[in-house]
Amino acid sequence: MRWVSYIVPQVIARFTSPFNWDIRVLEEKGKYKLLVNGSRQSGEYILKLWQHAFCAFGIIPSPDIRRVLVLGVAGGTVIHLLHAMYPDATIEGVDIDETMIGIGKKYFGLDRVKVLTLVVEDAKTFLEKAVRKHNHWDMILVDTHVGPDVPEFVTDERFLTLVRHALAPRGVAIVNYLRELQYLALSGDLRKKLKKTFRDVGETDIYFNRFFCCR
């Protein structure tokens, strides 16, 4: 721990990858934070977003949640939250960026989550294979942000249909999207497509994010 981090955030490590041009691990007030292409991807801010969404959607600890899939790993903040809520559930984290997964293990403790399996793969490809094998999860989180952006495939009806087919009969999917600038209109389009794909869709907003809960 560097005392100076309580005054000014310190860059601990810096990376680049085929998918992210600027990845920084910062130490801020004695804790590591992840900054990807200028956007925060871990820490208290991200935790607050997900806690708000879980509370708004009534997502609570339950023994019925046995398998969880997280599409988009980043610093793994939501993975640690899920593990705390469902300590007996297995968690699979999928990220297209191998560098990001390595950072999650080295700096953010993902290697200590024994129930976690990490997979380097494109989210769409992973789901296509899973659906063909009839794999199902009780909870699926779609959190595939690339820095400050969300990939276009998240609003593709074919991708959303894959998510629905990968859910267990009473499963729940939560999509973390944005609502600023160009994403304001796109989030409205996403809502319409989700309502066509799922039986029940709820939503909640916090800061620049819009979350959708699908059952």
Image (spheres, helix red, strand yellow):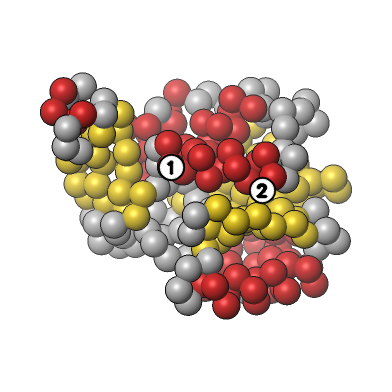
Q: Depth check: 49 or 13 in front?
A: 49
Q: Determine the residue located farthest toward the left in the rendered image.
A: 4
Circle nearer the N terminus (1, 2): 1
Q: Is residue 8 left or right of residue 154?
A: left
Give the percent coordinates (x, y) of residue 101: 39, 43
Give the residue number, with chain letter if any, for mark 1: 45
Give the residue number, with chain letter if any, for mark 2: 140
Mark 1 residue crowding within 10 angstroms, few (<14) / some (14–19) / many (20+): few
Tag 1: amino acid: Tyr
Q: Is residue 170 left or right of residue 83?
A: right
Q: Quadrant of the N terminus?
A: top left
Give the percent coordinates (x, y) of residue 65: 75, 33
Mark in the foreground, 1 or 2: 1
Tag 2: amino acid: Ile
Q: Depth check: 91 or 26 in front?
A: 26
Q: Quadrant of residue 185?
A: bottom right
